[in-house]
Image: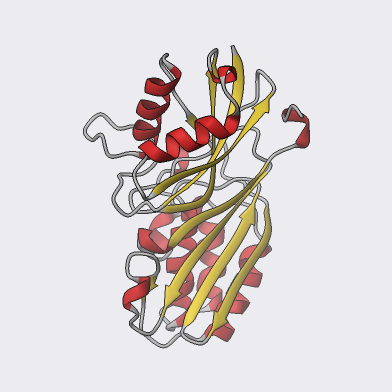
Amino acid sequence: MSRYFLELSYCGTKYNGWQIQANTPHTIQQILNDVLSTTLRHPVTLIGCGRTDAGVHAKQFFAHFDSLTLADHPFEFWLHKWNSMLPDDIAVHQLYCVTSNANARYDAISRTYEYHIHQRKDPFLYQRSWYYSQTLNNAIIQEGIQKIKQHTDFACFTKDASEYNHTQCIIYDIQWNVQDHRIVFVITANRFLRNMVRAIVGTLIWLGIGKYTLNDLENILLSGDRKKAGFSAPAEGLYLTQIKYPESIFIL
C-alpha cells in the first residue's frame, strides 16, 4: 500500500464545503472519494489539507490517500481519467508519491488564503468575489493590518475557540491590495482557525467604514471574544491558494 498526495482545485459555489456530511452528497470529498474508489477498484477516503466551508473556493488544495492499484498505470493516465469523470468545477492537476506517514493536513507548514472584493457591480465576478460597494478607508485598514500582525492569539476570530488546544497562529504575511474597484486580501500563516479569514475581513470592513476604531481593534484582539469582532465576510470571496509542505515527505 503506497501513499499519494493529490493536488486539485475547485469552485466551491455549488458545494457544501470539502468535508463529507451525513445530510448531503454535495461535498468535494465525497465526489472525489466516489471517483477514485470506482477507478482504483478499492475503497478510497481522501484526507484533505483543510475543511473549506460551503461556497469557498480552492485554487490549490491537497489530499492524501493510500492505494495498491494506482501503480498499475502512469500518473497521467489517472489524472486524465479522473478529470473526465469529475464535474467541470473540480479539477485534479498532479499526483505525488509521499512517505507512508505523510499527512496532507498536519504536515502543511503554511497556508495562504485570498479574499476577493469588488466595489463596482461586475457580473463576471458574481459568486467569485464579494460585491461590497460602500466606500472604505483603505489607509486605516492598512494600519489595522499592521496591528493584527503584532498578535499571535486569534481566538476572537473563530466560532468556537474551545475546539482547539490553543488559538495561537503565526502570520507570515498579510496584505490589503487595492487596484481600481477590486481588493484582494492575502494572508499566509502556519495555521488557521475555523472561520478566521472571513472574520478578519469582516472586522477590517467595519474598521474601514468607521464602525470600529484602531483602539477597538486592539481591544478585540486582546479579548479573545468572537462576539466583539466583526461579521464573517461571505463565502464566495474566499480562496485557498497555496499550501506548502516540507520537501522531506515527497519521494522523488
Write the residue at 25% across / 29% down: 22
Write the residue at 36% across / 49% down: 88
Relative to 111, residue 236 above or below? below
207 lies left or right of 120: right
Write the residue at 74% across / 37% down: 246
Q: Using the rendered image of the protein, determine whether residue 79 is visible from the camera's viewpoint.
A: yes
User: In front: 1, or 138?
Assistant: 1
Counting from the top left corner in percent of width and height, residue 109 is at 69, 42
Location of the N terminus by quadrant is top right
Relative to 113, residue 180 above or below? below
User: In front: 157, or 67?
Assistant: 67
Location of the C terminus by quadrant is top right
Write the residue at 41% across / 66% down: 230
Relative to 219, residue 192 above or below? above
101 lies left or right of 126: right
Counting from the top left corner in percent of width and height, residue 20 is at 34, 32
Counting from the top left corner in percent of width and height, residue 127 is at 33, 65
136 lies left or right of 189: left
User: In front: 188, or 46?
Assistant: 46
194 lies left or right of 49: left
- Quarter of the image holding residue 17? top left
User: In front: 84, or 21?
Assistant: 84
